[in-house]
Amino acid sequence: MELGASILWTAMPVEMVVQGLEPQVPAAMEMMVEGRLLQVLPGQDGIGTVQRLLSTDPQDYLDPRFQPGTVINLHQS
């Protein structure tokens, strides 16, 4: 059986129904790594994950060290 869209009929305001369902997005930080500005999601033990590269140089986007998902040391500069 395939699940489709559902309708919820209730007298409660929609704000009460969806309260607490907002996704919890951790705060990313910006840091310079080898002269490139990166948005990094901090993790445990000084390790972070690259979320986004902020650069105007197209060659930077071809460098695998700066691609999203790359794990980096937060204490490097």
Image (cartoon, grey):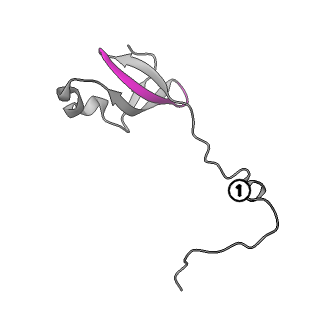
Q: Position of residue 32 (x, y in %)?
A: 37, 16
Q: Position of residue 34 (x, y in %)?
A: 30, 16
Residue 30 position (above or below residue 1): above
Viewer-proximal residue among 25 and 77: 25
Q: Position of residue 49 (x, y in %)?
A: 43, 33
The residue at the far right in this view is: 11
Q: Amino acid at mark 1?
A: Val
Q: Quadrant of residue 66?
A: top left
Q: Residue at x 52, y 82 (%)?
A: 2
Q: Quadrant of residue 53?
A: top left
Tell me if 14 is positioned left or right of 27 in this view. right
* Residue that numbered label 1 is attached to: 18
| Element carrying mark 1 | helix
Q: Quadrant of residue 18?
A: bottom right
- Magenta stretch? 34-45
Viewer-proximal residue among 47 and 36: 36
Query: Number of numbered discs present?
Result: 1
Viewer-proximal residue among 62 and 77: 62
> Is residue 36 within the magenta segment?
yes
